[in-house]
Image (cartoon, rainbow, N blue to C red):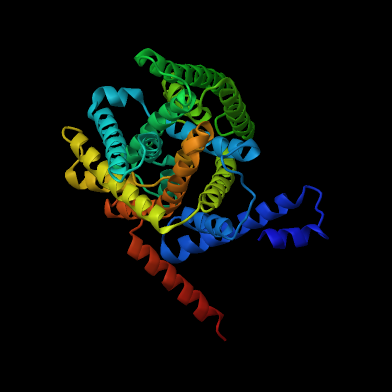
């Protein structure tokens, strides 16, 4: 692909530069394949986006740098921030007061996932200083994948709602601990206070930025219509500004957006719809994010040894999340059948795991290559397999507005009818 690009550059000189043409064509291909995947298989469009990005990465497309930096890092952070702000705005804190077992379930599945992955990797002979970052990366579920699956399946129900909450909370833990661990790398830790300080710094800056964002949005909603085009533009620009500000000050941009959405829910408890214009912009950024994540992840060095470790990490992670969700299910108000499908919906990994991996790899040059060689293939595989598992879980839980088999049959029948009408 690099040779093809160099050939093009000799005679093709677009005003915005050749990378703009490359990414535009890549996104166009992702749009078409995502549509075809959903139409003819019933699987979410994100699967098509990921396959296009993975193919580009495997073919040597060098449009994204690793570790993430510059405009690529900002776009991923912005897309994740938009998703987490919307997800945080749907989490009422009083729900945890009435049903505290949801928090117990969240902590149980996250802690068990970290411990199980860490123990498995050290048992396989990996250095603890490389196993700990990989366990932290595996902790993060993907609300970005899950929200796209929910949108494409038009799902609603207790399993769907709880899966989004648990995935969002696991992202909160991973982003906080990942940023803190990246700050601790290379620094001597004498006591627990020295280890706790980076966590408090990341949380403090993120909370302050999120509080400022929520206050500004709250003020805007007092004088502007929630469905207005200007409100949508203001919302996007405020989230973009907070993303750049939090990252510059030493906090976590996605974490600040998540906390800002949760605070906004407390300041503005009345239900309000995410502006339609903002949803369109979010969809474009989300598609770009999935293509970028899979393009970067596919550039990892693949080998039989790495494949074995990656498969072990994925298997242990799936089992640990299922056991953690099951342990926390006692007294949570959900049935055991719902707990099974809930653990399946928690399986995807995507942009948040990649952001955490990028931070940890950039902070530790000595073990960064080893961490990346395992984390990137795991993220790519669980972005694809996780989307399929989450879709199956939602359908099996009966929370999609249309059964999967009936939807596929309806599409086939509609296509046959249209074809017959075209015949003379």
Camera-side residue: 243 or 267? 243
Q: Can residue 185 be seen in this view?
A: yes
Q: In this view, which residue lies farthest toward the bottom?
A: 424
Camera-side residue: 382 or 390? 382
Q: Which residue occupies 43% across, 54% down?
A: 384
**Residue 178: x %, y % from top left:** 44, 30
Quadrant occupied by the C terminus: bottom right
**Residue 181: x %, y % from top left:** 44, 27
36 in relation to 298, above or below: below
Quadrant occupied by the N terminus: bottom right
Camera-side residue: 181 or 72? 181
Q: Kindly indicate the quadrant of the structure image that contains residue 112.
A: top left
**Residue 2: x %, y % from top left:** 68, 58
Q: Which residue occupies 55% across, 48% down?
A: 296
330 in relation to 64, above or below: above
**Residue 28: x %, y % from top left:** 63, 57
Q: Kindly indicate the quadrant of the structure image that contains residue 122.
A: top left
Q: Which residue occupies 44% across, 57% down?
A: 303
């Amino acid at each position: 692909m690099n040779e093809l690009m160099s050939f093009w550059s000799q005679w093709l000189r677009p005003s915005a530069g050749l990378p703009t043409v490359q990414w535009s064509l890549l996104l166009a291909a992702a749009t078409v394949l995502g549509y075809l995947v959903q139409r003819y298989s019933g699987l979410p469009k994100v699967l098509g986006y990921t396959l296009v990005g993975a193919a580009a990465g495997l073919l040597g497309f060098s449009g994204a740098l690793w570790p993430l930096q510059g405009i690529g890092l900002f776009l991923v952070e912005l897309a994740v921030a938009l998703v987490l702000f919307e997800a945080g705005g749907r989490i009422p804190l009083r729900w945890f007061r009435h049903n505290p077992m949801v928090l117990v379930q969240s902590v149980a599945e996250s802690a068990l996932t970290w411990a199980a992955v860490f123990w498995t990797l050290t048992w396989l002979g990996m250095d603890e200083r490389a196993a700990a970052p990989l366990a932290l990366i595996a902790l993060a579920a993907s609300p970005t994948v899950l929200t796209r699956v929910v949108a494409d399946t038009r799902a609603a129900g207790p399993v769907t709602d709880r899966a989004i909450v648990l995935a969002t909370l696991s992202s909160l833990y991973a982003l906080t601990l990942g940023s803190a661990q990246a700050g601790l790398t290379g620094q001597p830790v004498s006591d627990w206070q020295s280890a706790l300080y980076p966590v408090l710094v990341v949380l403090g800056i993120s909370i302050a930025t999120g509080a400022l964002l929520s206050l500004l949005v709250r003020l805007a909603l007092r004088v502007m219509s929630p469905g207005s085009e200007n409100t949508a533009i203001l919302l996007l620009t405020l989230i973009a500004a907070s993303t750049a500000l939090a990252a510059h000050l030493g906090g976590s941009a996605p974490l600040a957006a998540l906390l800002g959405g949760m605070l906004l829910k407390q300041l503005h408890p009345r239900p309000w719809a995410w502006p339609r214009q903002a949803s369109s912009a979010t969809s474009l950024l989300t598609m770009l994010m999935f293509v970028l994540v899979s393009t970067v992840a596919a550039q990892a060095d693949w080998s039989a040894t790495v494949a074995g470790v990656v498969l072990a990490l994925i298997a242990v992670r799936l089992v640990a999340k299922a056991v953690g969700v099951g342990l926390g299910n006692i007294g949570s108000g959900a049935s055991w059948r719902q707990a099974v499908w809930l653990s399946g919906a928690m399986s995807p990994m995507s942009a948040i795991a990649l952001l955490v991996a990028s931070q940890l790899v950039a902070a530790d040059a000595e073990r960064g290559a080893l961490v990346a060689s395992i984390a990137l293939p795991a993220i790519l595989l669980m972005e694809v397999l996780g989307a399929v598992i989450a879709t199956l879980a939602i359908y099996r839980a009966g929370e999609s507005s249309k059964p999967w088999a009936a939807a596929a049959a309806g599409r086939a029948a509609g296509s046959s009818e249209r074809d017959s009408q075209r015949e003379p």
